[in-house]
Every structure is written in C-alpha cells, then in structure tokens.
Amino acid sequence: MNRDELEGKAEALKGKVKQAAGDLADDPNLHDEGVADEVAGKTQDTLGRARRKVGEAIERSTITRLVAVFILSAVVHAQKPRERDLKLPIGGTPGALDAITDVQGVEVGHTTLISGSGKLVVGKGPVRTGVTVIHPRGKANADPVFAAWFTLNGNGEMTGTTWVQESGLLEGPVAITNTHSVGVVRDAIIRWEVSQKNALQPWWLPVVAETYDGGLNDINGFHVKPEHVLAALDGASGGVPKEGAASRTTNPSHRTRPARVATSAGAPARSTRRPNRARSSLSLPRMPRCSRIS
C-alpha cells in the first residue's frame, strides 16, 4: 500500500466522521463537507491503487527482462563458437576434439582459485589464479617423451629445461602456474612423483612454466598450495579440457602458449595452428614409445 492509498483512506474516513457529526448536530454544511472529504479520499485511494499496480507491473516486467537477459547470456556463453566453428585460417589439421587431448594418452588437470573482490589486500585477495598440469602419456604411464625447449623472448621462467636439453626427454608432467608459485608447484610435483614410485632417476627435475597474473591476482599472497597441485595431478583426464577462465587461464592478462596449451592444438605431426607467444616454450613432437630410463 502506497502513500496515496493511506492518505486517501484516512481522508475518506474523516469525511464519514464529519457526516455523522453533521447529522447529530443537524448541521447540513458539516454533513456536506464530510461527503466532499469522503469523495476526495476515495479518489486519492483509487489513484494510489492504480499507481501501485502500474509500479508492480513495471517491476515484474523489469524482473522478467533481467531473467531473460541472464538466460540469454548463459545460452550464448554455452554456445560460444570454438575455433573450428569460426573457420579461422590458422592452418593445420585439427583432431576430433580440437584440443591437445586429441593426442593419445594426453591428460589435462586444473585447479582454479577464485575468491574475493575489490581492493587488493596482500594475503587475502582478490585471488584469480591456479595451476594446470599436463601428463603427456597420462598419469598412469611414467614413460618419458622426446622433448626440446627454446626461449622465444623475454625472461619467462621454466624449470627443468637444462635436463630436457641434455637428455632430449621430458620425464613427468608439465605444469603452468603464476610467476610466484613456480617453486611450490615444482616441489609438489616431486612429492607426487615420489608417492607414485615413478623412479626414472634418483632425482626429479619437473618442468614448470609461469605467467604473471598480478594484474588481477594477489600474486604476493602465495595462494597456490601443494594440495592444489596434487588435486590437478590426480584429477587430470582426457576428453575436452576446461576452457575459458580455468586454472592459470583465470587471469586474462597473460598471453602465453603454456596457458593455452589445452585447446586449439593441431594434429601431433603439425604445429602450425597457432603462433607461439610464449616467453619460454616446450615442444613435444609425436610421442613414440621409448624405454624407461634406469
């Protein structure tokens, strides 16, 4: 009930009281004044009810529109075209999934960390980061793959490259995280490998690459923990990997190949599908079987 309705009802009631008083006092003027007040009050009450109904209709319409926009947005997001749908002239031959998991045995795992908003408070947030891991042969297969690496530009950190260059092999998974979490991810991978008893060598030198996400993430809060890495390692799977704001791709400020390795990969024998923008890059050719190193 709005203000006009309340005031109208009060005015109409006052009019009725005046009419009764006029009748008791045998005062026709007071009676007529009461009639006028009652009519005016009822009119104001009617206008108030009309305004309320119009307001409710507008409110319902607004809510309906907001719901429609939300649903439409969700549908559009769900139907967002992939590269092959847009027929972009990138070259190469895509696999069935148009993803790195088209390569037999490859498994991808993510842990995405999103919390907080507003002004940066170091140690609390906002947090927009995570870790991505890639098992070249799957987490159940410890056999190495042939590999090489090179620096494209800049000073991007990638651990384990000296052994890759020396041996020509990649032993274990590749991981990608934010610049200040490379160490914890590397150590967690070693812990995981030891627990799996995948003793290719008496030591482990995991490959972990980074991209800076401090533009949107509390990078100095060190929010990536060993348990996040272990969850990504154990949860890795084949099929279409998560796309969009997942794991290290949570922060859109980076533009590096490692963080985009999960999708839009070409057939294993051809690597011309997307220009390489990584600061450091690990190249994995077609994956032949090779004996375990003792």
Image: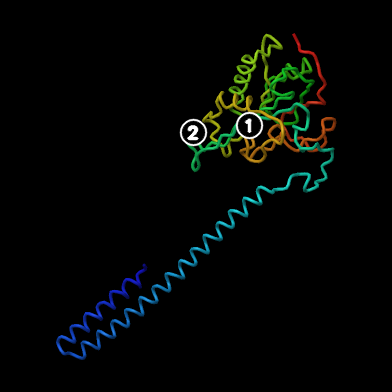
**Chain-order first, disc 2 or disc 1:** 1
In the displayed structure, 7 sits above or below 144; it is below
Viewer-nearest residue: 35 or 3 = 35
Indicate the quadrant containing the C terminus: top left, top right, bottom left or bottom right: top right
Q: Secondary structure at mark 1?
A: strand
Q: Residue at x 28, y 77 (%)?
A: 11
In the image, residue 259 sits, relative to residue 79, either above or below, namely above
Residue reaching furthest to the left: 25
Residue 176, quarter of picture: top right
Residue 5 numbered mark, or none: none
Q: Which quadrant of the figure has residue 30?
A: bottom left
Q: How many marks?
A: 2
Which quadrant does the N terminus fall into? bottom left
- The residue that mark 2 highlights is 122
Instruction: Find out whether the residues at labels 2 and 1 contact each other: C-beta distance under 8 Å.
Output: no
Q: Which residue is found at the position 42% from the left and 69% from the top?
A: 52
- Classify 10 Å Cα crowding around label 1: few (below 14), some (14-19), many (20 and above): many
Instruction: Give the residue type at disc 1.
Output: His
Q: Circle 1 is placed at which residue position?
A: 110
